[in-house]
Image (spheres, rainbow, N blue to C red):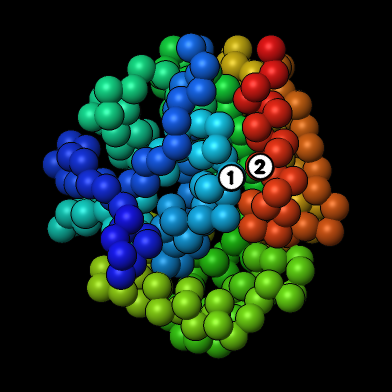
Amino acid sequence: MTKDNPEIGKSVPTGAYLTNYHDTGEVAGVDACPLLLVHGSGPGVSAWANWRGCIPILAERRRIVAPDMAGFGFTERLPGQVYDRAIWCRQLLDLMTALKVDKIDIVGNSFGGAIGLAFAIAHPDRVRRLVLMGSAGVSFPITPGLDAVWGYEPSLETMKGLLNIFAFDRALVTDELAELRYRSSIQPGFQESFSAMFPAPRQRWVDALASDEQLIGQLPHRALVIHGRDDKIIPLAASLRLHELLANSDLHLFARCGHWTQIERTSEFCALVQAFLAAD
């Protein structure tokens, strides 16, 4: 990360563009592999904004790699780029190749869960275990909350409203956080690429992120499905369906928690993930 902006980490070529990513911690044990953190799809989001509370904790035991997905954060934007599930999965594969990583564990948040799931289906031998948190990846009727997030038009008041949708604990939604996230959302190129990804009608983008349920059901990987019971962005039914489809999955629900599981329940979330990844 740079001294002036912690959201900017290292840079590596992934296909025709440079991916901004964070790489910290140590691989523990002979059989351990890096842990890849894939962020969600909120306005102005970046890997650092999504995972900043978790990275120091998880990096105590694992090497952590957290990229800005194409079209988000400080990853290079190409003129006229069309963003879809295939592009994002290819980015992860190119990132692993560039970093000389053969196999990973994945933690995917929301949109990132859908991409992690699709990557595991496309490249099952490159994934060891899978954590899906408030995850998309199956089809569901779009919620008013998700429609509002994807339809974001920049203003400080709109950002305050979105933060109230994201978090169950309103104490987290401060004026300072709203100002920070609003300023992030209006950096050059950020809103342009974000608004181009999910234009109305937005149900089609929920469906576009969904993997074939038969293919999900064929995944042999151990998986952990996590959801906040009060999530207004991704319905609990989506995680219940993922748990039903993934034959080798565990399910954990956090009470009094919204879509920000990793922010609202940071220490508990990290302990849960660490225990799952370390279990025989």
- Structural crowding at the residue carrying mark 2, measured as other residues with C-alpha within 10 Å and reported as few (<14), some (14–19) or many (≥20): some
Pick the residue in front: 59 or 95.
Answer: 59
- Across and down, in percent, residue 105 comes to 51, 26
Q: Is 103 on the left-hand or right-hand side of 32?
A: left
- Let me know if residue 243 appears in the view: yes
Say which mark, if any, is on residue 198. none
Residue 26 versus residue 24 in the image, above or below: above
* Location of residue 230 in the rendering, given as x and y in whole percent from the top left corner: 79, 58
Residue positioned 61% across, 33% down in the render? 131
Residue on which the image places disc 1: 57
Left/right of residue 108 with respect to residue 240 in the rendered view: left
Look at label 1 and name its amino acid.
Ile
Image quadrant of residue 245? top right
Where does the image place residue 194, in percent across and percent down from the top left? 37, 63
Query: Whole-Å distance between the Cαs marked 2 and 1?
Result: 7 Å
Where 192 falls versus 250 (above or below)? Answer: below
Q: Is residue 235 above or below residue 225?
A: below
Query: Local crowd at mark 1 within 10 Å, few (<14), some, or many (≥20)?
Result: some
Residue found 49% across the figure and 70% down from its top: 151
The earlier-in-sequence mark between 2 and 1 is: 1
Q: Is residue 104 left or right of residue 17?
A: right
The amino acid type found where label 2 is placed reads Cys
Residue at 23 percent across and 29 percent down: it is 98
The tally of labels here is 2
Labelled pair 2, 1 in contact (Cβ < 8 Å): yes
Screen quadrant of the N terminus: bottom left
Query: What residue is disc 2 on?
Result: 270
**In the image shown, does 242 or 170 lie closer to the viewer?**
170
Give how far across and how far down residue 29 sits, in percent.
Answer: 52, 17
